[in-house]
């Protein structure tokens, strides 16, 4: 499965084709943000 990053969609490459991915544009960035927030919460740096 391909997760289109915002940058790839802007460049019009493979990520620019909405039929090639099951997740919306920007999904990978949101997943990374949530993962990092979880890590920071576990470390006590984010409440």
Image (cartoon, rainbow, N blue to C red):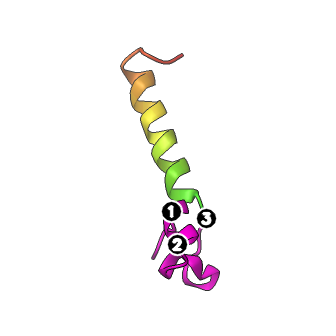
Q: CA distance from mark 2 to mark 1?
A: 6 Å
Identify the residue under disc 1: 7
Identify the residue under disc 2: 11
Do callouts 2 and 1 mark residues in contact (Cβ within 8 Å)?
yes
Q: Earlier in the sequence, mark 1 or mark 3?
A: 1
Q: Label 3: state its secondary structure.
A: loop
Residue 28's place in the image compared with 22, above or below, is above
Q: Which residue occupies 55% across, 78% down?
A: 12
Q: CA distance from mark 1 to mark 3?
A: 9 Å
The image shows residue 46 at horizontal and vertical percentages of 49, 18
In the rendered image, the quadrant that contains the C terminus is top right
Identify the residue under disc 3: 25
Q: Earlier in the sequence, mark 2 or mark 3?
A: 2
Q: Which residue occupies 45% across, 32% down?
A: 38
Magenta stretch?
Answer: 1-23
Q: Which residue occupies 51% across, 51% down?
A: 29
The image shows residue 22 at horizontal and vertical percentages of 59, 74
The image shows residue 28 at horizontal and vertical percentages of 50, 57
Residue 34's place in the image compared with 20, above or below, is above
Residue 4 lies left or right of residue 19; in this view the side is left
Q: Is residue 39 magenta?
A: no
- Count of labels in the image: 3
Q: Label 1: state its secondary structure.
A: helix
């Amino acid at each position: 499965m391909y997760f289109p990053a915002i940058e790839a969609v802007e460049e019009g490459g493979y990520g620019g084709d909405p039929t090639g991915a099951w997740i919306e544009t920007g999904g990978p960035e949101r997943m990374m943000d949530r993962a990092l927030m979880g890590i920071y919460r576990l470390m006590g740096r984010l409440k």
